Amino acid sequence: MKVVIKKIPEDKTEFAALHVHEETPQTQLISSYLENEEYNTVIVPCTADGKIYRIPSDSIYQIESIGNVQHVHTKEKIFQTSKKLYELEKMLPVKFVRVNKSVIMHLNKVRVYTPLANGLMKAELGNGESAYISRKYLKGLRDLIREGLK
């Protein structure tokens, strides 16, 4: 497939147009990738063991708020950040979603969703941890979960 990139003035809205013979699952995937800005990686400043780290958002599984400290969970390690949960929620890409009062989860890192009897849902993450999606946030997430936001 040929790719053409055209520079536009700053005051114009950026957009992408796909010219295809037919719409396929692959073209839908490309469209979703662009619309949801999945190419957008944010660096989250964190600390652990007295050192400062720059954690790319693609490495984050979930962010959990305990007291005034946010714990950034990656595959192998847990870091801390001084940023507030609401600040992180605003700066992270669309694939990060608030799932309860104290957790933001990376939807692409979920392996299994399990509905629970009390109206909650449990999300098991690829790093072996889990998060609970409260009823308040589940309503808005149902469509994303069903679609499997890729």
Image (tube, rainbow, N blue to C red):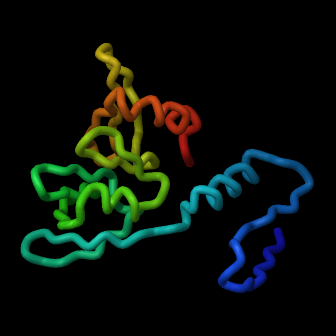
Residue 91, can we see it?
yes
Seen as rendered, the residue at the extreme right is 21
Residue 67 picture location, percent across and down:
10, 51
Residue in front for this viewpoint, 49 or 119? 119
Residue 5, position in %: x, y?
76, 80
In the image, taking residue 56 as reference, residue 9 lies left or right, namely: right
Taking 71 as reference, is 105 left or right? right
Residue at image position (39%, 60%) is 90
On the image, the x and y values in percent for residue 9 come to: 71, 85
In the displayed structure, does residue 49 sit left or right of residue 86?
left
- For the image shown, how many numbered marks are present on the structure? 0
Q: Is residue 50 left or right of residue 137?
A: left
Work out whether 123 lies above or below 79: above
Q: In the image, what residue occupies the spot 55% across and 66% down?
A: 39
Q: Quadrant of the N terminus?
A: bottom right
Query: Which residue extends farthest top?
Result: 117
Q: Which residue occupies 55% across, 45% down?
A: 149
Q: Residue 57, relative to residue 101: is it above or below? A: below
Q: From where the camera sits, is residue 75 visible?
A: no
Question: Which residue is painted at 55% across and 33% down in the image?
Answer: 143
Measured as percent of width and height from the top left, residue 15 is found at 72, 68
